[in-house]
Amino acid sequence: MPSAPITVHLIGDSTAAEKEPDARPETGWGTPFADRFDESVTVENYARNGRSTRTFLEEGRWEPVVRDLAETHYVFVQFGHNDEVPSKEQYTPPDAFVANLEKFVDETLDCGAKPVLLTPIARRHFDEAGELEDTHAEYSELTRSVARERDVPLIDADERSQSLLRELGPEESKSLYLHLSPDEHPNYPDGATDDTHFSERGARRMADLVLEGIDDLGLELAARVVRDE
């Protein structure tokens, strides 16, 4: 008997978003993530570059998600990169960040759907001694606290990606992010050194970490993942 259809709504920032052709090979992890499920799962990617929880709400991007929710749906929520930087116009103070995450969770539950919170995936910041810096500490912990208090599933993408980066080290980990030499790609004639956004390879690895989290949580979605041969 065919599996009942499931829809996953992904909301978040540029690290998860679909990219325009002129931004390639920059790739959000939501793109390879969507390709890893069988035909019974549809992934709707609402993540957008430069958004925080606050601006995502202020721009009315949450309403179409809520409007479409049903009991067979999931909402994956990954914010923090833009919320946490005071110098950015998208900055969201900690108390507002928590309130916004709670809104996403509560309204998803009110619709009978299933929220899943994700901490923000790590930036590739190594210090001079080759030690990885924890750039998301406060906002990742705020996300964990909302998951605990609302008793909803959490995928600790920050912790998982930090572990991967430490394993790879300062040099090998560059391949996961948008590091390009001049003239290596026509979209970046001057090259690129970006330790926040992912290469195609990096997006696949980060999607794998999220899928591992789905497995560890025992979500129904885990049975719909197309496994590598």
Image (cartoon, helix red, strand yellow):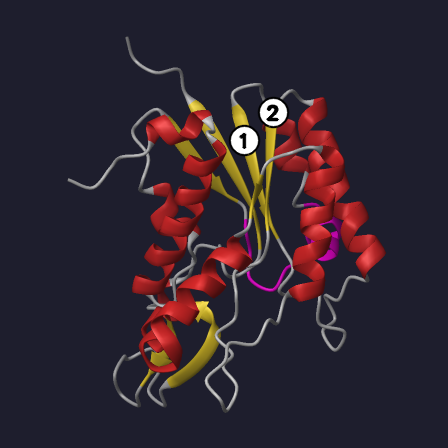
Which mark, by number, is residue 22? Answer: none
State the residue position of label 2. 113
The residue stretch that appears in magenta: 47-60
Depth order, front residue of 135/69: 135
Q: Residue sitting at 34 percent across and 82 percent down?
A: 171
Horizontal arrangement in the rendering, residue 29 relative to residue 51 (left or right): left
> Percent position (x, y) of residue 172?
31, 76
Query: Which residue is rendered at x = 65% and y = 45% of the image?
Result: 61
Q: Find disc 1 in the rendering and name its residue.
A: 74
Question: Is disc 1 in contact with disc 2, using a CB cutoff of under 8 Å?
Answer: yes
Residue 140 visible in the picture: yes
Q: Position of residue 97 (x, y in %)?
A: 77, 54
Q: Is residue 169 above or below residue 6?
A: below
Point out the image quarter for the N terminus: top left
Q: Secondary structure at mark 1?
A: strand
- 134 is within the stretch colored magenta: no
Q: Position of residue 84 (x, y in %)?
A: 71, 66
Q: Quadrant of residue 173?
A: bottom left
Q: Residue visible at 29% across and 30% down? A: 38
Tell whether position 58 is magenta: yes
Side of 11 relative to 25 (left or right): right
Amino acid type, callout 1: Tyr
* Outermost residue, right side: 95
